Image (spheres, helix red, strand yellow):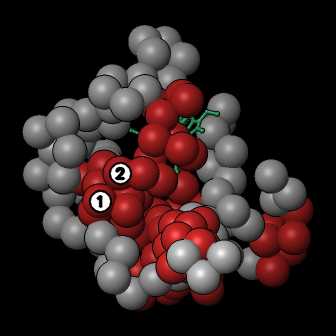
Amino acid sequence: MKRLVPGLIALTVVFCLGSAPVSAQDAAAGGALFKQKCSPCHQVTGLGIKGVYPALAGDPFVVGDDKIVAKTVLLGRGGMPSFLPVLTDQQIADVLTYVRSSWGNKGSPVPPADVAEVRGQVPQSEQKDKGN
Ligand code: HEC
């Protein structure tokens, strides 16, 4: 049993990374999140599915104003769900930092403070309505 303990602690840490803000998270954590939360639609290649899910690779919008991109992910748009109740500011910052620096994209990293600022501007009523 004693030898199990370090393994259990490591496992717990791995599971917590998925749900809690962790200061050491970076683009690598963003990559894991992208795979989990975004690739079902946008695909691991970032190329999406033509006519259904837009490509994020080579998309000028994605590497543009980070607060506008963060707002899109927070609120969702069209066929894309809102991630406001699902992901923390840190997680959205990480996933967007990953998206903006992958597949040849060359956007700046997204600070969690920028995501927090946009989240703070979303009216309370809108925050409550988004249940997914
Ligand atoms: C259920 C499918 C789905 C999932 C999951 C999804 N998206 Fe989307 N996403 C879409 C669709 C559909 C659009 C286009 C919306 C529209 O028509 O305006 C879109 C649009 C976007 C855009 C805007 C692209 C542009 O050029 O306007 C960004 C950025 C984006 N998604 C990022 C993400 C990120 C990051 C994640 C994961 C946290 C994610 N999406 C998860 C379906 C999805």
Q: Is residue 13 above or below residue 15?
A: below
Q: Position of residue 79 (x, y in %)?
A: 66, 32
**Residue nearest the viewer, comparing 118 with 40:** 40
Q: Dot 2, how many residues are within 10 Å of its Cα: few (below 14), some (14-19), or many (20+)?
A: many
SS of the residue under disc 2? helix
Mark 2 residue type? Gly
**Residue nearest the viewer, comparing 37 with 104:** 37
Task: Look at 81% across and 80% down and name the residue there.
Answer: 124
For residue 131, what is the image quadrant? bottom right
Q: Position of residue 18 (x, y in %)?
A: 57, 65
For residue 64, what is the image quadrant? bottom left
**Alpha carbon distance from label 2 to label 1:** 5 Å
Q: Dot 1, how many residues are within 10 Å of its Cα: few (below 14), some (14-19), or many (20+)?
A: few
Image label count? 2
Is residue 75 in view? no
Residue that label 1 marks: 28
Q: Position of residue 29 (x, y in %)?
A: 37, 62
Task: Look at 33% across and 82% down and name the residue there.
Answer: 24
Q: Position of residue 27 (x, y in %)?
A: 28, 62
State left or right for residue 117 relative to residue 31.
right
Task: Look at 55% across and 29% down and name the residue there.
Answer: 40
Q: Is residue 27 above or below residue 49?
A: below
**Residue nearest the viewer, comparing 12 with 6:** 6
Mark 1 residue type? Ala
**Residue nearest the viewer, comparing 65 with 50:** 50
Q: Answer yes or no: do the residues labelled 2 and 1 have beta carbons within 8 Å?
A: yes
Residue that label 2 marks: 31
